[in-house]
Every structure is written in C-alpha cells, then in structure tokens.
Amino acid sequence: MSRQSETEIATISTDNPYVMMATEDSDNQTPVVTATVVSTFPSQTRTIYINGLDNTCIEVPTEIADKALQIQSMGRGIKCICFIDLVFNLVYMLYGSVIGFIFSLASASGIYSTYYQSRSLLTCYLCYQYIMVLSKLLTIIFYIALTDSDVRNTFHENYPQIQLPETLAAPIFMSSMLFFIQTYIACYVRKYYNLLPNSGDKKYFVARALPSV
C-alpha cells in the first residue's frame, strides 16, 4: 500500500482557530508552522483541505491537524449547548432571578467564544458549568440527607411552607441523572477549551505558509 493511500484527507474551514490567513498577519510577525503543497506524505503529518481557498491542500503536523479537526467537529455542539443554557437562563431572569441574568451572561460568553475561538470568553462559561455540576451534586446530597427522619423533621420545623414528597427515591434518581448529564456536558466543554490555542500556541498556527491561490 502506498503512503499516499494511507494518508487521511480532511477538510477544515477558514475560520478554524488553527488557520490564520496571510492578510491577518501582514507584518509577518507571527511565527508559524511550515505548511507546503502536498507532494510527499511524511509519516508525522496529515493532509487537510481548507475551504474557501480553491481546495488548497496542505500538510501540517499530526498533533495540530488533530486539534484543528476536533475543534471543527465540536464547535456546533458547544454552540448548541450554550444557546440552550441561554434560553433557560433568560427564562429564569424573566421571573426576577438575578442569578439567571448572571448565568445568561456566562452563556452568551460561551456563544461568542465559538465565533472568536477565544479561551478567555470560554473560561467564564466553563466556570458556569462547574457551578452547575456542583449544584447538582449538592442537590443529591440534600435529598439523601432528608432520608434520615431526624433531618427531615428538623427541615419541616425550619421550613414548614415547603412540602416534601412522601418518598425521595424519585427525586434522588432524577437528581443523579441530571448530575451525570451535567458532568458530561462540563467535560465536553472542558475538552473543547483545552483544544483552543492560547497566546503561547501562536507558533502552531497554519498561516503565511499557505500556498498562494
């Protein structure tokens, strides 16, 4: 089998954070990884096409190509999660919840981070995800604690206006499911966050080395 047939051909878009066009760095100050028109297929590179550049084909190191492709595939999912959170938090805000307003800002920052591929913007939303995971965990602990009759009686004495269900099996189960779902979402966001380049990763951008079209 030839080396060419073993090479995976993938496609990324021009707005990928690991693609920087020459026009964005006219002073040629940003250090970049060398990318060349595909003529050979070294074992440690992957071949990618960049949309919008007349199907320009280049080679980049495997590690960077993998990051670029993962960001490409995860971006829509992150954006969808942020929009869903934003809708729910706006609803909470309409009911007079200040926390809903604060969390809406966090969701909005997550949405903007997918457009600008910004770690700093996504940091706020990632912290929000951690808060939500913690709140789901505390809810489980709260319901489990109420299974103790002494704790339940004390709760009734302190908060007589709150009616608790006769059995707490269903609330514990639902809270546990929500906790695991929230944890999965937080881990997904964290993975996307780790893939985004920061200021120290500029040397990994594929930029001026793109062949002219």
Image (cartoon, helix red, strand yellow):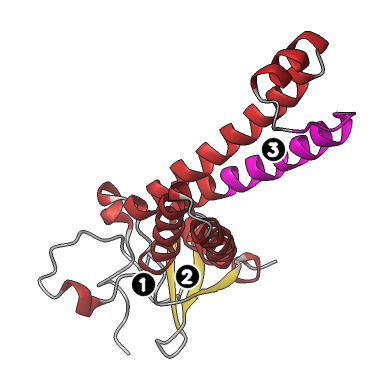
Q: Is residue 194 magenta?
A: no
Residue at horizontal 43 percent and vertical 55 percent from the top = 101
**Circle 1: element type:** loop
Q: Which residue is mark 1?
A: 36
Question: Front-most of 59 and 142?
Answer: 142
Tell me where the magenta segment starts and ends, as one range: 163-188
Instruction: Say what amino acid the circle numbered 2 marks.
Output: Thr
Dominant secondary-structure state across the stretch colored magenta: helix
Q: Which residue is mark 2?
A: 40
Please name which of the two marks, 1 or 2, marks the residue nearer to the observer. 1
Residue at horizontal 69 percent and vertical 23 percent from the top = 141
Mark with earlier residue (3, 2): 2
Instruction: Say what amino acid the circle numbered 3 marks.
Output: Phe
Instruction: Say what amino acid the circle numbered 1 marks.
Output: Thr
Question: Front-most of 53 and 89?
Answer: 89
Q: Are the two marked residues, 1 and 3, in contact with CB atoms closer than 8 angstroms?
A: no
Q: Quadrant of the N terminus?
A: bottom right
